[in-house]
Image (cartoon, rainbow, N blue to C red):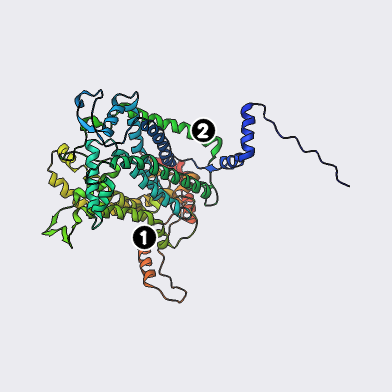
Amino acid sequence: MSAAPTAEAPAYVANTKVGRFTDFVDERVGGSGILREFGRKVFPDHWSFMFGEVALYSFVILLLSGTFLTFFFDPSMAETHYAGSYTPLKNVEMSVAYSSSLDISFDVRGGLFMRQVHHWAALLFVASVAVHMLRVFFTGAFRKPREMNWVVGGVLLILAMAAGFTGYSLPDDLLSGNGLRIIDGVIKSIPVIGTYISFFLFGGEFPGTVIISRLYTLHILLVPALILLMIVVHLFMVVVHKHTQYPGPGRNDRNVVGYPLGPVYAAKAGGFFFIVFGVIALMAGFFTINPIWNYGPYDPSPVSAGTQPDWYIGFVDGALRLMPGVVSGFHFEYIIFGHVLTLNVLLPALVPAGIIFTVLFTYPWIERWITKDNREHHVLDRPRNAPTRTAIGVAGFTWYSVMWAAAGSDLIATHFHVALNDVTYWLRALFFVGPFIAFAVTKRVALALQRKDREIALHGRETGRIVRLPHGEFIEVHAPLDEYKRYKLVGFESLAPLPAQPNEHGVVTRKENRRAKLSRWFFEDRVAPATPAELEAGHGHHEAVEAGEGQKTLSH
């Protein structure tokens, strides 16, 4: 005998067409569970986390403005005579790519504005990615479990620079053509295969007839797709690993203190997107950038002075300018087996960039090897509490900045009325000694700030009140800190040097000895945070001073 069928509870039916359509999609896709779970994700609230949002929003603006520009730009290098509305270039022979860029600037409604929105957004995108990575480095957010996310960030930085360079070269004006000429020289300096790569890339002898169309394909298709993929991977790992947070009461590696994504952060993100868009639009409307009509079409025969690339590529150009051709009779160009080896181009173009990105990608594993710290870290460091890491970061940034400044050495000489050779010599000296000076100064400053924090935690903040004790001594009254501020000053882990450890056979290897030496160099100069006993003693001292304040005589 079969059991009687049980009545099922009636399914919810939406009252509106939009609601019914949403239910239809959700029953087949199952997106509500994903959105519900994602909306519950808690994110901490701190202004420095907004650099990553600026990068994301500027990339969205790049996609929107770039889509508009693709409707009007023609990447052909075929020759034509300009017939647009810009009179100074009437009937001038130029490429179709340059002619269409001029048409966008002068004949397409809103074209110049969109061009400048796209260019400013590109500069902001690279800058925000770079600053975001600096924030991650100085706060130690790259540590386990985020090493791979740090690598993704490094790839994003390289892709952002590649997107900027390929787009910068598309108008085929004199300025971008000179940049391509530098790239061609760097490629040809590669031994044996350099000339073949150049011929393949440019479709013949520079400048060829296909480089603009190939860069256009990279710029609108391959590079944006890779950037979008890296952004998705990056955000996925942020959700999986949960967000980092700055130290504070109640915050540890097992929780996240903040607000949920929905609706708090969703509303904030929407508003912040329009703020970023508004700032970029204001810059595009009021500040001219890349006025290609002033440069004219690219002609490989003349050499123009005073040309600088966009800032993110400037360090390569600066390294090329700093490299001498001859040092004490030692030449950097040789002919080996019939092939020209041009070290004065190859070395500055590839070695500094190689060093920067090799250290960038490997640093999380280098520091983990030195510290032997395999724990998960979700609470960030204050930069002053990791003085050696902070000093390394500032030294690298200084090295990059010297090369970046060298890209404008001619403008420094003309604007400040100094000799170009003197500027070059000073920058060459800073190229070698600048990072060491920056490292030493930064580490001393970080340690001094740690000592100041320890002093404030133990003795309180200065009030400016001077009192005279009964025996005639003058002292300044210090006010004790509240618990939150005191935790900020003492709530961190101060690692000590880790001596060499024997392996399972009881042998201390050479590699382990090297690690121990690096650990001693990394952590030997340190200021330990105040202990609870020291804080209690200092707190008792404050209570005694406050209790006896009525007996003190104020000095006049």
- Front residue of 438/359: it is 359
Residue drawn at the location 55% of the way across and 51% of the way down: 254
Looking at marks 1 and 2 on the same chain, the residue that comes earlier in the sequence is marked by 2
Front residue of 150 and 349:
349
* Element on which disc 1 rests: helix
The residue that appears at 63% across and 39% down in the rendered structure is 28
User: Which residue corresponds to mark 1?
Assistant: 522
Q: Which of the 4 image quadrants contains residue 120?
A: top left
Q: Please state if 211 lies on the left or on the right of 469 as rendered.
A: left
Numbered label attached to residue 140: none
Q: From the viewer's perspective, is 134 left or right of 416? A: right
Q: Is residue 1 above or below residue 174?
A: below
Residue 381 visible in image: no
| Residue that appears at 20% across and 52% down | 345
Q: Amino acid at mark 2?
A: Ala
Query: Residue 448 at x, y = what percent?
Result: 34, 51
Q: Which quadrant of the structure image shows residue 225? A: top left
Residue receiving disc 2: 267
Question: Can residue 400 be spotted in the picture?
Answer: yes
Mark 2 falls on what kind of element? Answer: helix
Q: Residue furthest right?
A: 1
* Residue in front for this viewpoint, 524 or 460: 524
User: Horizontal placement of 521 versus 415: left or right?
Assistant: right
Task: Write down the quadrant of residue 208 in the picture.
Answer: top left
Q: CA distance from mark 1 to mark 2?
A: 43 Å
